[in-house]
Image: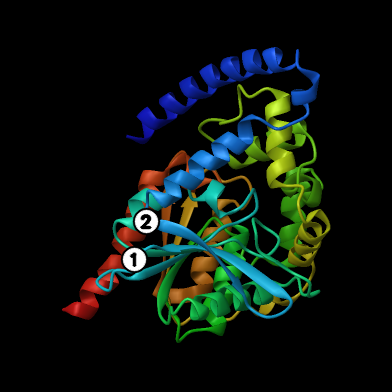
Amino acid sequence: METLRLCFHNLLSFHLSIIATLLRWLVSQLPTIKRFPLFVPFIDAYVSLLFRFSNLSPCILDLDEHTTIHFWVPNHRCLDKPNLVLIHGYGGDAKWQFMYQVRSLARSFNLYIPDLLFFGKSYTTRTERSEEFQAKCVAEGLKGLGVRNCSMFSISYGGYVGYRMAEMYPEMVEKVVILSSGVGCSQDQKEEQLKKIGRDPVELLIPSKPEDLHVLVNLSIYKYNPFKWAPDYFLQEFIDMISRSYLKEKQELVKHLLADHTDSKLPILNQETLLIWGDKDRVFPLMFGHQLQRHLGPRAKLEIIKNTGHAANIESPDSVNALIKAFILQQSKDLNA
């Protein structure tokens, strides 16, 4: 199934790039329209519909006079389904990162999907930039939505946030799934990995031009590049819409993440934890997954997806979704036995 999906994506990407180029040429003849973004807003609206068709609706909560957080929440919460929180990483808001998860996972879970602060419609005027503060805001938002217990699936930067949330709110978080995250890396390991990548992490994670985005996608994807055939103006539209809001604050988040702070004193979670890694991950290589598993001990297990890079949620969504369901739903069966 995933092989067919890859072939379809390559073919679709090629044909869409041709159509987009022709349309752009036509529009270029109309100078008054030329300045407006055309394609990315259309795709963004399509992804929003995908979320709505998965029984989800947007919801904005004011946590206090300084902080607002945006969630996608179930239209109707099913009491016989467990709650699952999806926490995204860098690379756009939650919609763009979980588009291949929502339809499959919504059949088995009540999904709660926040935009982290300074992504999508979530923001704060406070100066905190830590993963702990992000975790606190997600947890307070969930409490405001009436969620008292949940499991969690988090990706990359979201893994740092999810880990801290599981540590800070053990009474709320029942089970943890982390996909390809650098949680627990030492400062020396961070610096060594950045040397291998050879790019400024702020420039890489918050691209400002198409070539930066190409580098980020090529680094994150192993099997195929979804932007391979995309013309530069399309990529610039994507950057302008997804990456340029709250630019200063996003840069501060990256700098805080890379700072030499408390990862060396990382606590061991009480929850059962599933780590999912692509064996071709070049952002956080597989050795980091083994290292985190050893740190967590016998309550953690590591699942490796073959021929998959950092963005396994995009490259191998069927495998990721199946692993999440098997891991979390087995707990529900055990509790009901």
Quarter of the image for residue 228 reads: top right
Report the residue marked by disc 1. Answer: 76
Q: In this view, does 150 lie to the left or right of 78?
A: right
Residue for point 79% across, 35% down: 209
Which of the labelled discs sits on residue 95, or is there none? none
Indicate the amino acid at tag 1: His
Indicate the amino acid at tag 2: Asn
Residue for point 66% across, 63% down: 122
Locate residue 125, reporting x and y percent. Answer: 78, 72
Q: In this view, does 225 lie to the left or right of 145?
A: right
Quadrant for the C terminus in the image: bottom left
- Visible residue check, residue 308: no
Residue for point 68% across, 28% down: 234
Mark 2, residues whose alpha carbon is within 10 Å: few (<14), some, or many (≥20)? Answer: some
Residue extending farthest left? 337
- Residues under labels 1 and 2: Cα distance? 7 Å
Residue for point 57% across, 73% down: 138
Quarter of the image for residue 121 reads: bottom right
For the residue pair 100 and 143, the one nearer the viewer reads as 143
How is this picture coloured? rainbow
Report the residue marked by disc 2. Answer: 55
73 lies above or below 277: below
Locate residue 213, reporting x and y percent. Answer: 71, 37
Q: How many labels does the image show?
A: 2
Q: Of the residues under marks 1 and 2, which one precedes in the sequence?
A: 2
Label 2, secondary structure: give it.
loop
Locate residue 154, reporting x and y percent. Answer: 52, 62
Quadrant for the N terminus in the image: top left
For the residue pair 283 and 127, the one nearer the viewer reads as 127
Asked if marks 1 and 2 touch (Cβ < 8 Å), the reply is yes
Label 1, secondary structure: give it.
loop
